[in-house]
Amino acid sequence: MFAVFKSKTEKWNVSTRTKLFAAAFVGFIALLYLLASNVAYAVTVNGEFVGYAGTVEEINSAVDSVTATASGALGYEYALESNVTYELSIGRPDAKIASVVEEVLLDDIDVIGKYSVVCVNGVPFCAFESTEAASAALSAYIDLYTNENTISANFAETVSIIVDYADNNLLEVAADFNANAVNFLSVATVEDITEETVIPYETEQILDSDILSGDTAIEREGQNGLSRIRREVSYINGEPQSSVILESETLTAPVSAILHVGTRERLSTGTYIWPTEGTLTSYYGYRKIAVGSSYHQGVDIAASTGTEIYAADGGTVIFSGTYGGYGYFIKIQHDNGDETYYAHCSKLLKKSGETVKQGELIAYMGNTGVSTGSHLHFELRIGGESSVDPLEYFIDD
């Protein structure tokens, strides 16, 4: 009985040890697995722990991504100033560790921020704190160039709003944009405009030989017409670019002016020269004389018979012959309507209807008519009416 009992005890001890060893081995393996699955890189930024990374590549990729983002936002190659470290440690890798590292690093860069960025043709132009603020600023800018006639208004450039990291200086550009928006961007507008427009009258010219060259006479005054025009006008920042007439209606037709244009040769200069040589013996105005009028309407210039007499200005001879007390007498009408008289001549060289130029020889001095001696009686009558003192009009004394 005793021998049998000993054998069973030994068998039991062997079995127990085997089972315990197996269990210990499994536990050890499990511990190794557990330890292996919780080994990761502890990541710190500027000495602050931010999480666990499974691989170094994740950390480097996050750093590279932040450097690229900052460089793009600033427009130059940015050198990361934050201190990123990592070391193996016990911990469970975070699947989002790269995003966490990027966020921490980006927040640590004080020259950029995450904004609502207005881009023009894909290039950042300015930045706002919110998309609502950016949209409101752009709408207000377009409104600067619209009115009650505007039928469409859009940016001429491609303008978009994106949420991204950008240079903080773009916030200042946005402030200027809000304060002084005109001409920052190009706004294309189209207006439907209806307005009344003057139709200028035309002038019909008629050549007229009865009028002096250079002078004109109006036969009929011109009158402008009026039309109603509807146009579609395109603008860039309020400056007209093109216009298309959609409708046109004449309200009042214009009336042409009729203008007579003179072609008659201009003979006169409008000035008067001394008509002869000699001695001034009698002035214009009242005088005491035995023969002739007491009111002298011209001047007398004495010289020997046959002294040459010249036209004081150019014009047309309207009388040539004997005329009462004037004796042999020539009357010249000038372009301005003035008339000059040449009396007491001994011989007349021009006939009525002939034209003469200023300084042209027209007669010779004499003593015909009511005269006390050889002289020229000269008169100047303004407009062919009242006489005036010739001495006040001569340009050559």
Image: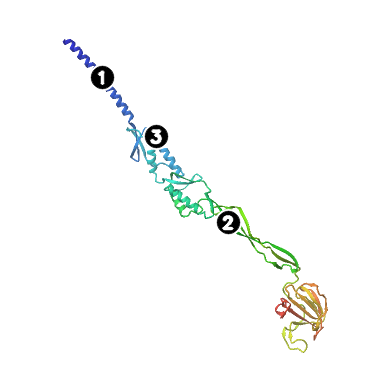
Task: Say above or below: 188 vs 299.
Answer: above
For disc 3, the marked residue is 58
In which quadrant of the rendered view does residue 78 lie? top left
Task: Say above or below: 72 vs 290.
Answer: above
CB atoms of marks 2 and 1 within 8 Å = no
Q: Where is residue 242 in the image (x, y as percent from the top left)?
A: 59, 52
Q: Nearer the viewer, residue 376 or 132?
A: 132
Q: What residue type is labelled 3?
A: Glu
Q: Which mark is residue 19?
A: 1
Q: Where is residue 75 in the image (x, y as percent from the top left)?
A: 46, 44
Q: What residue type is labelled 1?
A: Lys
Where disc 2 sits, the SS reads strand
For disc 2, the marked residue is 194
Task: Say above or below: 360 vs 134.
Answer: below
Q: Which of 394 and 177 is in front in this view?
A: 177
Q: What residue type is labelled 2?
A: Thr
Query: How was the colour assigned to the protein in this rendering?
Result: rainbow
Q: Position of residue 241 (x, y in %)?
A: 58, 52
Q: Which residue is drawn at 59% across and 54% down?
A: 231
